[in-house]
Every structure is written in structure tokens, then in C-alpha cells.
Image (tube, helix red, strand yellow):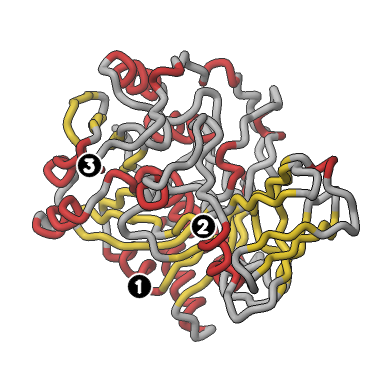
Amino acid sequence: MTQDLPNIDLKKFQYNLPEEKIAKFPLKERSDSKLLCYQKGTIEHHQFKDISELLPENATLFFNNTRVIPARLHFFKETGALIEVFLLEPVSPTPDVASAMLIKGQCQWKCMIGNLKKWKDNIPLSLYLDEVLTISASIVDRDEQIVEFNWKSDHSFVDLLQLAGKIPLPPYIRREVSETDKERYQTVYSAQEGAVAAPTAGLHFDNKVLANLHLKGIKTDYLTLHVSAGTFQPIKSDNIMKHPMHHEQVTVTKANLESIMASDDIIAVGTTSLRTLESLYWYGVDLLLKNKQDFHIEKLRPYVLNESLPNAKTAIKAVLDHMTDTELDEISGSTEIFIFPGYSFKICNGLVTNYHLPGSTLILLIAAFIGEDWRKVYEEALQNNYRFLSYGDSSLLIPSSSSGQGNEKKLSLF
């Protein structure tokens, strides 16, 4: 049974974002960005390089170590017409992103195809990389925009993307990709190939900031959520519950879970890390209730109210026990979790995040995390000339209320 959910008025989550406030380029030094620190209703302004001085003692930061792939491929017809193929998610021979990166010879991906009407069925397009290496692309399913790629070499698919693809900057950065973007649109700790958008909250961390965290005794841990292009999808329905949330692939390790168990103050670096951590809680709930074994969190799973809820440590222990029983050191799944005002946070006590588009799912998440003060934070940032969106400045958000850990009652949101 799903709780009757309110009709949230999306107009209340809009704000005026002047074009000149959108950062078109990154700063020369990552940690020179501004940092707005919101803590229990008060706001202070700092530089990001000082973040280690602002974090709670004994905090653990969870980072998303996904790495952006050059997901934009440009094919040209003999007429000269450009067909852009934007990779979204693998379909065959495996839907697992990490495995799909290593495929050789042939694979199929769900894509967004620019100029689709000019690409006829049964007419493959070719992309010539050198005298012997060619990628061939054919439409397999026009409605779903599934494309099959073929190549004859020992190159893995990710090797081909590095040779032929372009970094997929967000649509609101209206310029061509530059050489600088290849390095600056990645976090310094990125490791797992598969995202088509960067976990941008992490772009501010450089090696010196990470070293300072270590010196201060701040613990760090790394999990993986491969960010999808759906993160930029605007809410078009007046009823936000009808918004089709994107599903994103998640991989976590036993060490991640043990770190959660040992931590009391958990700070998510970015909304992707937060969504991963909160999804783990709901996976643990599903395991405890023996509803299912597979790790997939549906969009409105947190709002299904037919059970009493365990505390965070009990739910995470259930996932750990499951991994031990199945002899797994890591587990992969997917999440569509939709977090909006009223959600009771189970794992995260704090959040490092950039500034998001008006009326977006991410604004709703921020409003869920710090309440009505989200508008106060955004107005302060605008008035103090903060740079917005992916290449913009940062914030550290520590809400007044607890994260919801220890709540063993039924979820009652509204």
C-alpha cells in the first residue's frame, strides 16, 4: 500500500537563475571555489579549501568514484548530415555498465539520437578512427533508440570511446567541449568508468583538500553510482509523482557497509552519494521483510507504508549479512529513489553539493534535506555572487533535525 501523496506545487521550488550566474568554465584551481556553510539555520561563507575545518569531528565523507565516459559520438552521413549518438545505458550483451565498458567486438546501447529522422533503418553509419579501425553503428530499435556498435579489433568499448567520443557537458553549458574539460569534468578520485554526467559536488576536491581531511581525522570512503543523463531531465508534469525518475546503477562493497556501521556522522559528497546511501537503507528493509533479494529501489519505495521500519544500523546489517551469506565482497543494483519534501533521511547527516536548476528533482531533494531554508541558502548564494550548476561553487549543508536514524515507527510524511 502506498501512502496518499500530496500534490506538491512545483512553482514553490522555482527561483530566478540569471544566465550570467551559470558557470560556463571551471576555476583554474578546484578548491578556490566558494563554500557556503549552512548549519542548523545559520549561514557562513568560506572557500572550499577550508572544508576540513568546518566538518563535524569524526565525520565520514562518502564520495562517488564514478568516471565520466566520452558518451557523445558523432557520425556523418555521405550527405554531410551530422548524427549525434549519446550513450545512455548498455543493453546487450550485458546491462551492467562496468562490464559493458570491457566488451569487445559488438554491443548495444540505449541512446539519445540527434537528427534521428535523417538516419534510415538498415543503413549503418561508420566512424573512421584510423586506417584500420572503424566503428559501425546501426539502429536496432527506433522507438527505444537502441543502437548496435560493431568493430574489428582488440579494443574494448571504453578504449573506442576514449579515441572517438566527446565529454558530455550538461546542456546548460552552452559551448563546445574544450581540452580542459577532459580533466576538469572528472573528480580527482574518479575510477569506475560509466557515468554520462559528473558527480559535480566532488569537482571541488583536490589532492591537498583530501590530504587535509586525513590530517584532521576525517574518514573518507568511496562507492559508485553511474550518473545518468536523466539527472538533467526537467519535471514536466504538474503532478511530480508522475515524473519518470531515471534509474542509475549502483555498486557498493562490504567495506562501504562496514564504514556506514562504524560511522555516526555521515556526510554525502553530492546528491548521487546521498541517493546511494539512502537506497542502501531501503534495500536492507526489503531484505529484512524478505520481499525480494534483488537490489532495485523503485521511485516511491520510501512511501510504501505497510511495515514498521528498522533503524539504519539494522537495515545496513541486513545487507551485510546478505553479502556474507552469498559470499559477495561487492554488490550491484539500481535505484530510482525519488526524494522530496517530507522524506525522513535514514543515513545521511550532512551533504556537500553544488547549486541546482530551478524546479528540478534535485531542488526537491535539497528542500527535503534542509526544509524551507533551501530558499534562504539559494538567495544568499545569488546575492554573494556564487557560481551555479556543474562548474559552479559549493555548499555544506548540515540540517537542524537528525537524519531519521533510529526511527522504528511507520514512515509518516505529511
> Where residue 414 appears, x then y in whole percent?
55, 29
Q: Evaluate if marks 2 and 1 touch, with contact meaning CB atoms under 8 Å apart.
A: no
Task: Find the distance from the CA under tag 1 to the CA under tag 3.
Answer: 32 Å
Q: Which residue is mark 2?
A: 69
Query: Is residue 212 shown left or right of residue 178?
Result: left
Q: Nearer the viewer, residue 284 or 138?
A: 138
Looking at the picture, does residue 56 appear above or below residue 43? below
* Tag 3 residue: 29
| Whether label 3 touches label 2, CB < 8 Å | no
Up the image or down, 333 lies above or below 18; here it is below
Give the residue drawn at x 9%, y 58%.
Answer: 215
Q: Residue at x 31, y 56 (%)?
A: 188
Give the mark nearer the N terminus: 3 vs 2.
3
Q: Which image quarter: residue 333?
A: bottom right
Q: Quadrant of residue 96?
A: bottom right
Farthest front residue in view:
131
Q: Which element type, helix, strand or loop, lies under badge 3?
A: loop
Which x, y percent locates residue 24?
Answer: 41, 30
Pick whichever of labels 2 and 1 is earlier in the sequence. 2
- Dot 3 amino acid type: Glu
Which residue is the site of mark 1? 255
Compute the Cα span from label 3 to label 2: 23 Å
- Towards the viewer: 181 or 400: 181
Local packing at callout 3 (Cα closer than 10 Å; few below 14, some 14-19, many 20+) is few
Q: Nearer the viewer, residue 330 or 120?
A: 120
Which structural element holds mark 1? Answer: helix
**Horizontally, is 407 left or right of 146 in the view?**
left
* Kind of residue at badge 2: Ile
